[in-house]
Image (tube, grey):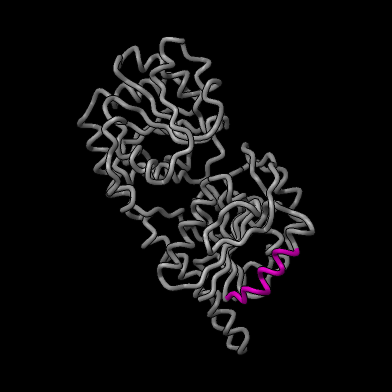
Amino acid sequence: MRIGIVCPYSWDVPGGVQFHIRDLAEHLIRLGHEVSVLAPADDETPLPPYVVSAGRAVPVPYNGSVARLNFGFLSAARVRRWLHDGTFDVIHIHEPTSPSLGLLACWAAQGPIVATFHTSNPRSRAMIAAYPILQPALEKISARIAVSEYARRTLVEHLGGDAVVIPNGVDVDFFEKAEPNPEWSGQTLGFIGRIDEPRKGLPVLMAAFPKIVEACPDVRLLVAGRGDEEEAVASLPAELRSRVTFLGMVTDEDKARLLRSVDVYVAPNTGGESFGIILVEALSAGAPVLASDLDAFAQVLDQGAAGDLFTNEDPDALAAGAVRLLGDPARRAALSERGSAHVRRFDWSTVGADILAVYETVTDGAASVATDERVPLRTRWGLTRD
């Protein structure tokens, strides 16, 4: 099958959506499919052979974060050329409502279109206001996927229609087989995320850290991600700052090793999360997880069975949870065991098969329409036509 995938966010700036698209493309390629990904990227940036640049992106505030998007006449021309050259059997557009390549591709594409909705934002006035503009593009979508129940709810409440829930995927074995780094082990908390993005929750973790140190004098914190490191520790007492080690941007291999090494992985995110791929990666690595009780995080962690939850934006609750886990090896081992079993449902062997089933359904439906054989498409995929 010839598959075109549209990424809305800059390939140069790592994020959950980009990682999902990258891993999906590489999974499909391993299965023998022909895949091309269109993404915003600087023309000078080295790209994987399956990625086509649509030009440089610009930063835009979006859903409590800063998204690097690509829109305009030049981008539209590149989208049309990519569609013309690709002759794809199916187009898979991620975040088709964002003002970026997905919307441009939705306007320009012909044939079967699958759309994945990643955003969870139950109070998006912008999405409601933009609905009249988005409607003609959305009507062209053959099947809708949401990465979580909360992303599906955002779609239903703001845009109507429905979607099948297929979560983000992860290569479980990659994280499970990573070698721990002895230098990162022993009374260690881990955090991975953009340091200077408040909703990732590092300030909450920093506010909790003095109480954690008070109860666990040997504890230290490993932080991986881009941002201002000095500003991140500015709220800590001077004598505690040396207990925080910043690793900067890490490779996938070092991320897996970090997750395999820490005693507890902490996800203090404060909102705007529709899924939580980092939680799945941590579970895959066998790390005991302590996360804020966001709805999406609770769902990924099986309502607390596969990881502990604390009250969102409450440093005292975070500290109490971390101290409890650091002092209870048996609890950590139990969480690791439960998490390792639970996470298998997110492996690409399962997630990829579900996505391929959607592709096959819409392409079979398109062939039936072309031959006037009106075969009903399976409604469980959130399809828009019979």
Kindly report the secondary structure that dominates the magenta region of the rendered protein. helix
Residue 293 location, quadrant: top left
Q: Where is residue 66? Give x, y as percent.
A: 64, 39
Task: Please give left or right for residue 175 compared with residue 54 in the image.
Answer: left
Image vertical order of residue 293 relative to residue 108, above or below: above
> Which of these two is toward me, 336 or 221?
221
Image vertical order of residue 185 relative to residue 71, above or below: above
Res 293 seen here: no
Q: Where is residue 64? Give x, y as percent.
A: 62, 36
Q: Where is residue 162? Give x, y as percent.
A: 58, 60
Q: Residue furthest right?
A: 73
* Residue in the image at 41% along x and 22% along y: 244
Q: Residue furthest left?
A: 330
* Residue in the image at 55% along x and 53% along y: 152
Task: Please give left or right for residue 8 compared with residue 72 in the image.
Answer: left
* Residue in the image at 52% along x and 59% along y: 48
> Which of these two is toward me, 329 or 303?
329
> Which of these two is toward me, 191 or 53?
53
| Quadrant holding the C terminus | bottom right
Residue 197 location, quadrant: top right
* Residue in the image at 52% along x and 15% along y: 235
- State which region is magenta: 77-88
Q: Where is residue 263? Give x, y as percent.
A: 29, 31
Image vertical order of residue 105 relative to residue 147, above or below: below
